[in-house]
């Protein structure tokens, strides 16, 4: 009798644990969640298909000519040469400005500063700056990097490559600080304590141990920020990026940086997108394909770098 | 005997340490300087603008800078409509993705699916603007809503929503993953199914973080410029409207339109100066939203 009861009990318990029937609603729910993720993938694919379909004919017909030609009123001869150079120079300025200041600020906040009210204010401030709409940075650029800079050195009245580069630097600076801080926080305390224990000063600890250990994370974060600067359009509209046609002629390097009109790849894309002529729409799509290819290579490299060199502590 | 003085090191070494410390502190101060300059520049120029105009121009029939009509309600209504449509897309898609990645996906599946969100996050807004103009507006909005014009706020809202999905998904996922394992195990121990555990235990425990994700999503949607400039229309100005199927002028769209001079006003006069006033309003709204989300994040950390 005991054995029978035990058998009944165990089958009742296992039936109870299994659930009365198959959990149809739960399965549907899981499928709906996965569907939301796959919808994002679908949007991504539709977007890529859209630009490749529209832009590929231009790239195959024109080839290198499209990559090197300057702006033109005729869609058959317009290219992204000048815009690409403008974008590359500005990203270079961003790397020179945002990288040292961003990493320096993060090192101060993570390694030097005590948890005071001032430190917390700076951290909050950095996170809020990261959330300020990019077009607002354009206003900063217009007032400071065009207006004030114009009074110090003679730059092009509506802005120049230098103004654009500095504006983009201010835009990505908080992102560099945040990603660098995360990389520094991931370095274990014990590493620092060991170095302090053998008599290293704070700077020696940072230079010889903390920064090398955090380097993959810092480099990846910085490269992703540069990619962000490369694709940013809105603030450049305020600091003089030209949406129409322009020529820099044979201006020297300094003239080009300070006193010439300039464009950038995303600004050129905007200009072509806004023109009603379908030939220009195709040019915009072709330029997007080039931009996405560059971003894919750069972002891919950054992520590979992180996965290859990052250590789990 | 070894004293504290011996351990302190040479004076040259200490001086070098102090110099380096000051250099790093200066770098950290740059971010504060940038914020201060943004605020001062915005306030200064916005006051200049307000001095040039008559207050009644701010509640005119529409936003037509050339005709001295600077209707703030027009911009406000359009911004709210576009951000509302964007969140109607980004909130369900982002939260569902976050719940799946955090509660359902195996580590292997997560490694394969998470890059979808990361790839979407890396797409520049100008590209989504192009997509919204060439596909979303003609093939989706106009197909389902026959009355929609080619340039419309619905397509802009959908585009902005696509851009906000990764932000909502990433922050919400972080919040869900921060919920302690023991809560899930407790629920399973009581016989709850995965769906019940996710929706009744994990999601409520992560409410603060999810709220922060949604608020940041709204902030991002309000600040998005390029999609709106390209596809919402109304770059030359717009009458007050609440019709999402028609063109409209958001705060960011108005600023960009003034910047590229598509209403031929670049230069002197109140029209160009209005750029700074709108910028100040935009800055205040997004700043308040960011502060609110920060508060939610802090609360999540305290209770987490």
Image (cartoon, coloured by chain):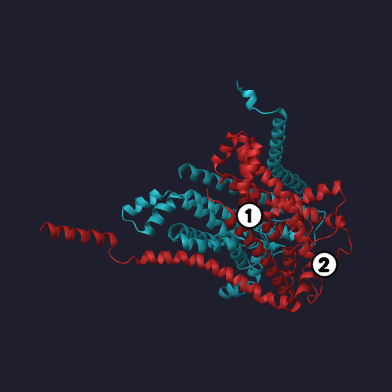
Q: Which chain is cyan?
A: B
A211 up-or-down from B252: above or below: above
Which one is nearer the viewer's eye here, B260 or A113?
A113
- Element on which disc 1 rests: helix
Q: As drawn, which residue projects farthest toward the top?
A: B1
First in sequence: mark 2 vs mark 1: 1
Chain assignment, label 2: A
Q: Please give the residue where the numbered disc 2 appears in the rendered image.
A: A245
Q: Quadrant of the N terminus of chain B?
A: top right
Residue B163 sits in which quadrant? bottom right
Q: Is residue A172 among what the camera can see?
A: yes
Q: Residue at x 61, y 51 (%)?
A: A217
Residue A21 sits in which quadrant? bottom left
Residue A117 percent location from the top left of the image: 60, 35
Q: Please give the residue where the numbered disc 1 appears in the rendered image.
A: A220
User: Is B213 positioned to the left or the right of A28 in the image?
Assistant: right
Which one is nearer the viewer's eye here, A168 or A193?
A193
State whether discs 2 and 1 lie on one chain: yes
Q: Which chain is red?
A: A
Q: Nearer the viewer, mark 2 or mark 1?
A: 1
Chain assignment, label 1: A
């Amino acid at each position: 009798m005991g054995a029978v009861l035990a058998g009944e009990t165990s089958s009742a318990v296992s039936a109870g644990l299994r659930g009365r029937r198959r959990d149809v609603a739960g399965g549907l729910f899981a499928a709906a969640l996965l569907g939301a993720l796959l919808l994002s993938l679908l949007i991504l694919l539709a977007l890529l298909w859209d630009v490749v379909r529209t832009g590929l004919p231009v790239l195959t017909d024109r080839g290198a000519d499209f990559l090197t030609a300057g702006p033109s009123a005729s869609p058959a001869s317009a290219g992204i040469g000048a815009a690409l150079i403008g974008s590359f120079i500005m990203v270079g300025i961003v790397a020179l400005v945002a990288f040292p200041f961003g990493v320096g600020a993060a090192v101060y906040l993570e390694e030097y500063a005590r948890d005071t009210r001032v430190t917390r204010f700076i951290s909050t401030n950095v996170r809020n700056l990261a959330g300020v709409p990019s077009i607002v940075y354009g206003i900063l650029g217009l007032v400071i990097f065009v207006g004030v800079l114009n009074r110090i050195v003679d730059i092009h009245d509506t802005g120049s490559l230098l103004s654009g580069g500095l504006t983009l630097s201010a835009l990505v600076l908080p992102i560099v600080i945040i990603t660098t801080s995360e990389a520094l926080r991931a370095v274990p305390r014990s590493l620092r304590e060991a170095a302090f224990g053998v008599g290293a000063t704070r700077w020696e600890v940072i230079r010889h141990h903390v920064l090398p250990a955090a380097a993959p994370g810092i480099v990846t974060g910085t490269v992703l920020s540069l990619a962000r600067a490369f694709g940013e359009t809105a603030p450049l509209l305020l600091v003089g990026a030209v949406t129409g046609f322009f020529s820099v002629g044979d201006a020297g390097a300094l003239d080009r940086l300070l006193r010439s009109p300039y464009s950038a790849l995303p600004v050129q894309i905007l200009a072509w997108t806004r023109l009603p002529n379908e030939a220009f729409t195709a040019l915009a799509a072709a330029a997007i394909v080039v931009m996405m290819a560059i971003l894919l290579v750069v972002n891919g490299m950054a992520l590979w770098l992180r996965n290859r060199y990052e250590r789990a502590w | 005997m070894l004293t504290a003085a011996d351990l302190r090191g040479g004076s040259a070494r200490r001086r070098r340490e102090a110099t380096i410390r000051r250099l790093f502190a200066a770098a950290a101060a740059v971010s504060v300087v940038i914020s201060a300059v943004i605020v001062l520049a915005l306030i200064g120029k916005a006051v200049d603008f307000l001095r040039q105009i008559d207050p009644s121009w701010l509640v005119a029939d529409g936003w037509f800078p050339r005709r001295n009509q600077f209707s703030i309600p027009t911009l406000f209504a359009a911004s709210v409509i576009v951000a509302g449509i964007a969140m109607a897309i980004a909130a369900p898609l982002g939260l569902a993705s976050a719940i799946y990645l955090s509660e359902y996906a195996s580590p292997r599946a997560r490694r394969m699916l998470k890059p979808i969100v990361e790839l979407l996050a890396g797409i520049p807004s100008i590209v989504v603007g192009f997509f919204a103009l060439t596909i979303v507006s003609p093939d989706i909005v106009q197909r389902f809503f026959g009355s929609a014009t080619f340039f419309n706020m619905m397509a802009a809202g959908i585009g902005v929503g696509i851009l906000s999905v990764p932000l909502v998904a990433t922050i919400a996922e972080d919040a869900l993953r921060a919920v302690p394992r023991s809560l899930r195990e407790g629920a399973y121990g009581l016989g709850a199914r995965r769906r019940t555990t996710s929706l009744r235990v994990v999601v409520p425990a992560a409410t603060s973080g999810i709220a922060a994700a949604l608020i940041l999503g709204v902030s991002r949607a309000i600040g998005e410029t390029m999609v709106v400039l390209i596809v919402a229309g109304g770059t030359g100005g717009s009458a007050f409207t609440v019709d999402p199927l028609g063109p409209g002028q958001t705060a960011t769209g108005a600023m960009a339109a003034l910047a590229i001079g598509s209403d031929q006003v670049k230069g002197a006069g109140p029209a160009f100066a209005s750029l700074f006033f709108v910028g100040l309003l935009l800055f205040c709204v997004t700043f308040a939203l960011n502060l609110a989300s920060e508060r939610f994040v802090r609360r999540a950390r305290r209770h987490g």
